[in-house]
Amino acid sequence: MHLFIELITLLFFLITVAHAVRHHGREGALFFATLLYLGGARETLVAVMRWLYGFAPLNLMLGPAPLIGAIIWGYSIYAAVVWAGGITGRSPLRDHPTANELSLAALFMITLACFYEPILELIGMAKWEDGTRRTWGIPWIALIGYPTLTVPFLWLWGRLRQLTGIKRFLVTAAAMTLLAAGHAAGLQWLKDGLGW
């Protein structure tokens, strides 16, 4: 069953990559490459440091982290961008995201947490730490975690788009590494501090 879900998730990821490239060209491809790096770095830290949750034994791996963990951030954040852009009539992928667009993307991601997390619990795919506080199968910390990775990513993306060449690559890699580490560590610290 897990392999089927992993393959469906990979298919959705590839469909959204194709959509981004078709509608945004090279910038869409760079958007997803950056998201894949961010998701991979974050989930690798979660796996190696044993922060927040563990993973069920899965089939498709990206180093110590499941591939599904790395790619789900990509198509989820892209879906949030498309949704926010559909409401505002702008493209946060091409333009600097406004506070309104960032708020809409955050709301979309909170809604996704309410959808994803009960399903992940039901099928035993993600195993949150013992004692993680939940309501209806939704970990409280996930309601903070989903938007707090999305909003800084989109804000950084809007600023880093101005850079070109090797400078853009190096600064983006450094920024995404710091965001991944800060997000995972910060959520663990907050979860422990609040007793969630």
Image: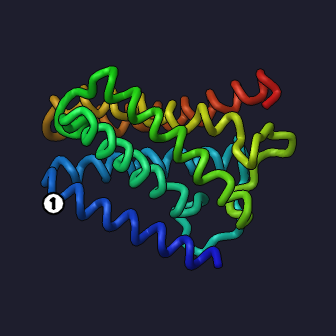
Which residue lies under the disc numbered 1?
Answer: 22
Residue 59, percent across and down?
A: 60, 75
Residue 167 appears in the figure: no
Quadrant position of the N terminus in the picture: bottom right
Q: Residue at x 69, y 32 (%)?
A: 188
Camera-side residue: 71 or 108? 108
| Front in this rendered view, residue 95 or 64 | 95
- Considering the numbered disc 1 on the image, is that residue within a helix, a strand or a loop? helix
**How many numbered marks, from 0 up?**
1
Residue positioned 32% across, 29% down in the render: 101
The x, y position of residue 38, in whole percent, is: 43, 45
Q: Which residue is drawn at 31% across and 60% down?
A: 16
Q: In this view, does 172 lie to the left or right of 52?
A: left
Residue at 70% over, 35% down: 140
Amino acid type at mark 1: Arg
Nearest to the observer: residue 57 or residue 7? 7
